[in-house]
Amino acid sequence: MKVNWRELFPEPIRTILGRMPPALLEQVEEVRIREGRPLEINAGNTYHFLTPQGCPTGNPEEAYVPQKEVTHRLLDLISNHSLYTLEEELRKGFITIPGGHRIGLAGRTVLSGGRVEYLRDINGFNVRVAREVHGVADRILPYLLDMKSGQVLHTLILSPPQQGKTTLLRDLARQISSGTKLTGGTELVQGIRPRLKVGIVDERSEIAGSYKGVPGFDVGPRTDVMDGCPKAEGMMMMLRSMSPDVLIVDEIGRPEDAEAVMEALHAGVSVIATAHGRDLSELSARPALRTLITEQMFQRYVQLQRTSRGMTFRLADGKMRGLQLTGAGGEAFG
């Protein structure tokens, strides 16, 4: 289900966004709304406040300031007029809406037994705009394939937040599932075995952008999606019921995630996963991921970085040795 993300907002925020310079509007990744504080956007990894005229500014005193009436209307819109139906999402601190857009929430927590029961007095929103970019995986995918067997290599993609990991996963799923790039025609992906079944475990509904279980993004014709399910449990469900050739999962990090990845690898299923981290040494310091790295369970590591030139990547093998790359946009690291 395609959703115009600007329609998510109440007036006057919707109008302010519509007044933005078109080139800047196209780059918007986040809209941050804080009650009684300036309206802020993240566009192209650069932050700006917005004036009532939709002009970017670095001066918070010039910016539009949403008040309680606007934030209450926004909460009403994203909850479809019923906060009660979002009890589980409020406990997690975010809501995923049709189109794969995720809205982070801030407010007062209510605790029960020392754990967060739900959020109340919500006054802060971070709307993360989801987009699909066909072809973003073109340069990377050839390095993730075993050209002799046509199998997808076990891969871990790492970067800090907002460097493009989820966008890359989405296009990898599409290309692996279809066996074609489909960027300007039907171009076969060289080296990939045809008719690979792909399983996506989409805990936060961001990869496939599912609405009522149906993906809103193009994730390929042979792709099954386990939507809104905890990663570890979802991976096990996929292995038991859908017999995927390739399993795709976003942001692993907990011990149960690592155990599920190990189970999948031992079952002969190729795994492509992402994790938050600046580099492999940082990931190795996390107990849940250390075993996967030290036992060389992954055959490829892809480190992403966004620059003014766009997405760049560095690549290493399972022993963390840099690989020699060809073409633009990539380099080896070890």
Image (cartoon, rainbow, N blue to C red):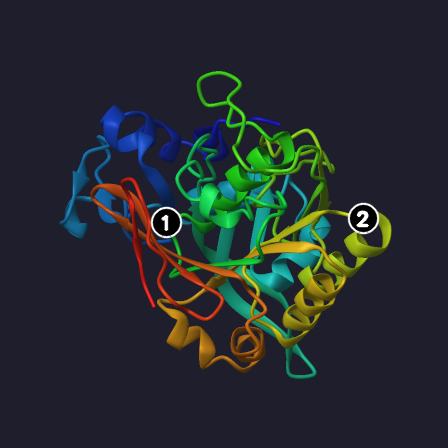
Identify residue type, mark 1.
Arg
Give the side of residue 144 with respect to residue 249, left or right.
left
Helix, strand or loop under label 2: loop
Q: Which residue is the site of mark 1? A: 32
Residue 195's tag is: none
Q: Is residue 118 above or below residue 217?
A: below
Comparing 11 with 237, the one in front is 237
Q: Earlier in the sequence, mark 2 or mark 1?
A: 1
Comparing 330 with 61, the one in front is 330
Residue 8 position, x and y percent, is 49, 34
Residue 72 visible at all: no
Q: Is residue 66 above or below residue 272?
A: above
Helix, strand or loop under label 1: strand
Q: Which residue is the site of mark 2? A: 243
For disc 1, the neighbor class at 10 Å (few under 14, some 14 to 19, many from 20) is: many
Per the model, the C-alpha gap separating discs 2 and 1 is 40 Å
Kindly indicate the quadrant of the structure image that contains residue 301.
Answer: bottom left
Q: Is residue 285 above or below residue 51?
A: below
- The residue under the point 64% across, 76% down is 255
Residue 246 position, x and y percent, is 67, 48
Residue 92 visible at all: yes
